[in-house]
Amino acid sequence: LVGGFDQGLVVAADNLPVSTSTGNRGYRAIVPSRFGYLGTPLPKFNSDDQAGNGVTMVGDQADAYVCLLDSLDIHLAVPVIAVSAGSTSALQFALRHPERCSCLVLISPNSPSAVRAVI
């Protein structure tokens, strides 16, 4: 999880192992764009977010990852690699849906201060 799928493809190419015998990665990378990245729409704040500090939006993003996995018929725990600001929604994904996250790798994590206090 990074800003968008463009960065995610680079992270996947650089970090997923390649079989020495077949040259095949043996993994499927799912690289969604975060809300607002690459011109994707930003959802309105959830009514639970009275302060408008973005915490719920990050939680909504984490929930959207679950919807994406469900739509791809992936119902098991998956490893999550997150870079920079993608770490915020990745952490929320792991906290809100631990049964769907087998491991969490954060590379150069960065999060807004309002969200950091919640994590």
Image: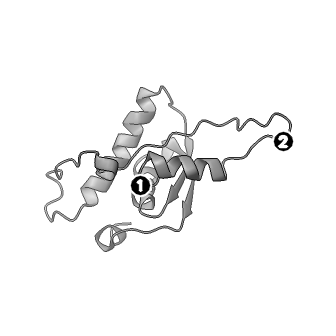
Q: Amino acid at mark 1?
A: Gly
Q: How many marks?
A: 2
Residue beneath the point at 17% across and 54% down: 48
Residue 109: percent from left, percent from top: 48, 67
Name the side, left or right, on which 82 lies relative to 44.
right
Return the residue at label 2: 20
User: Which element carries disc 2, helix, strand or loop?
Assistant: loop
Q: Which disc is residue 19 wearing?
A: none
Q: Quadrant of the C terminus?
A: bottom left
- Residue 3 got which mark? 1
Residue 102 visible, this orientation: no
Quadrant of the rendered structure where residue 22 is? top right
Q: Position of residue 12 (x, y in %)?
A: 59, 48
Across and down, in percent, residue 9 comes to 54, 46
The vertical placement of 32 against 75, above or below, is: below
Question: Viewer-proximal residue, 21 or 112?
Answer: 21
